[in-house]
Amino acid sequence: MAVDFFTQQLVARKARLILFQQIANQRLHYPYRVATALGEFYDVFAPALSQENKEEIRRAAKYIAERIEKLPDFRQRKEHVVKCWEEMQRILETSV
Protein backbone atom coordinates (compact mmCIF):
# COMPACT_ATOMS: atom_id res chain seq x y z
CA MET A 1 0.00 0.00 0.00
CA ALA A 2 1.46 3.34 -1.02
CA VAL A 3 1.56 6.08 1.55
CA ASP A 4 0.52 9.48 0.28
CA PHE A 5 2.72 12.53 0.49
CA PHE A 6 0.59 14.19 3.20
CA THR A 7 1.01 11.18 5.48
CA GLN A 8 4.75 11.10 4.81
CA GLN A 9 4.99 14.77 5.71
CA LEU A 10 3.14 14.27 9.01
CA VAL A 11 5.36 11.33 9.91
CA ALA A 12 8.47 13.35 9.03
CA ARG A 13 7.38 16.24 11.24
CA LYS A 14 6.69 13.96 14.18
CA ALA A 15 10.03 12.21 13.68
CA ARG A 16 11.82 15.56 13.50
CA LEU A 17 10.41 16.62 16.88
CA ILE A 18 11.62 13.39 18.47
CA LEU A 19 15.00 13.75 16.78
CA PHE A 20 15.44 17.34 17.96
CA GLN A 21 14.70 16.24 21.53
CA GLN A 22 17.32 13.52 21.26
CA ILE A 23 19.89 15.89 19.80
CA ALA A 24 19.28 18.33 22.64
CA ASN A 25 19.39 15.71 25.41
CA GLN A 26 21.69 12.89 24.31
CA ARG A 27 25.44 12.81 24.04
CA LEU A 28 25.57 9.86 21.66
CA HIS A 29 25.99 9.85 17.88
CA TYR A 30 22.70 8.01 17.24
CA PRO A 31 20.47 11.08 16.66
CA TYR A 32 22.93 12.35 14.08
CA ARG A 33 22.96 9.00 12.35
CA VAL A 34 19.17 9.17 12.10
CA ALA A 35 19.21 12.84 11.06
CA THR A 36 21.28 11.94 8.01
CA ALA A 37 18.11 10.41 6.54
CA LEU A 38 16.70 13.92 6.18
CA GLY A 39 18.79 14.21 3.02
CA GLU A 40 17.19 11.15 1.47
CA PHE A 41 13.73 12.41 2.43
CA TYR A 42 14.51 15.72 0.76
CA ASP A 43 15.87 14.05 -2.38
CA VAL A 44 12.81 11.83 -2.77
CA PHE A 45 10.14 14.44 -2.06
CA ALA A 46 11.72 17.71 -3.23
CA PRO A 47 9.85 17.73 -6.57
CA ALA A 48 6.51 17.54 -4.71
CA LEU A 49 7.40 19.97 -1.92
CA SER A 50 6.11 23.51 -1.78
CA GLN A 51 8.62 26.28 -1.20
CA GLU A 52 7.32 26.48 2.39
CA ASN A 53 7.98 22.77 2.93
CA LYS A 54 11.47 23.07 1.45
CA GLU A 55 12.17 25.94 3.82
CA GLU A 56 10.97 23.81 6.74
CA ILE A 57 13.49 21.12 5.83
CA ARG A 58 16.17 23.75 5.30
CA ARG A 59 15.55 25.16 8.79
CA ALA A 60 15.78 21.65 10.25
CA ALA A 61 19.08 21.04 8.44
CA LYS A 62 20.43 24.37 9.65
CA TYR A 63 19.44 23.60 13.25
CA ILE A 64 21.10 20.18 13.13
CA ALA A 65 24.27 21.58 11.55
CA GLU A 66 24.45 24.31 14.19
CA ARG A 67 24.05 21.76 16.98
CA ILE A 68 26.90 19.73 15.51
CA GLU A 69 29.11 22.81 15.35
CA LYS A 70 28.53 23.35 19.09
CA LEU A 71 29.61 19.83 20.02
CA PRO A 72 33.02 19.23 21.56
CA ASP A 73 35.67 18.54 18.90
CA PHE A 74 35.97 14.85 19.74
CA ARG A 75 32.22 14.38 19.15
CA GLN A 76 32.27 16.42 15.95
CA ARG A 77 34.86 14.00 14.57
CA LYS A 78 32.69 10.88 15.08
CA GLU A 79 31.97 9.23 11.73
CA HIS A 80 28.17 9.50 11.91
CA VAL A 81 28.34 13.10 13.10
CA VAL A 82 30.64 14.05 10.21
CA LYS A 83 28.34 12.33 7.69
CA CYS A 84 25.33 14.08 9.18
CA TRP A 85 27.00 17.50 9.02
CA GLU A 86 27.95 16.89 5.39
CA GLU A 87 24.39 15.87 4.55
CA MET A 88 22.95 18.95 6.25
CA GLN A 89 25.36 21.14 4.28
CA ARG A 90 24.26 19.42 1.06
CA ILE A 91 20.59 20.12 1.88
CA LEU A 92 21.38 23.74 2.64
CA GLU A 93 23.29 24.12 -0.63
CA THR A 94 20.73 22.36 -2.85
CA SER A 95 17.60 23.89 -1.33
CA VAL A 96 18.51 27.52 -2.05
Image (tube, rainbow, N blue to C red):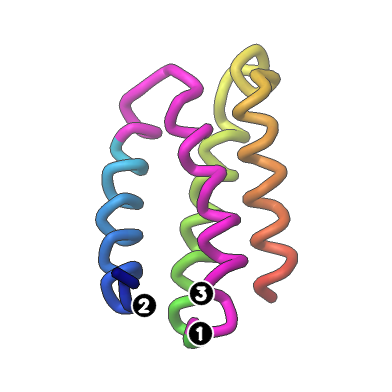
Q: Is residue 85 magenta?
A: no
Residue at image x 57%, y 76%? 46
What element does badge 2 sit on? helix
Residue at image x 68%, y 35%? 83
Q: At label 3, which amino acid type do we have?
A: Glu
Q: Return the residue nearer the eye: 93 or 72.
A: 93
Circle 2 Cα neighbour tier, 10 Å, few/some/many (<14 / 14–19 / ≥20): few
Residue hosting label 1: 48
CA–CA distance between discs 1 and 3? 13 Å
- What is the magenta range? 22-49
Residue at image x 61%, y 39%? 84
Note whether 81 is above or below 52 in the view shown: above
Mark with earlier residue (1, 3): 1
Residue hosting label 2: 5
**In what quadrant of the picture does the N terminus appear?**
bottom left
Q: At label 2, which amino acid type do we have?
A: Phe
Q: At label 1, which amino acid type do we have?
A: Ala
| Mark nearer the viewer, 1 or 3 | 1
Note whether 95 is above or below 36 in the view shown: below
What element does badge 3 sit on? helix
The location of residue 67, given as percent across then percent down, is 51, 38
Residue at image x 34%, y 70%? 9
Circle 3 Cα neighbour tier, 10 Å, few/some/many (<14 / 14–19 / ≥20): some
Q: Do the CB atoms of the residues marked 2 and 1 lie less than 8 Å apart?
A: yes
The location of residue 81, given as percent across then percent down, is 61, 29
Residue hosting label 3: 55
The location of residue 5, given as percent across then percent down, is 36, 77
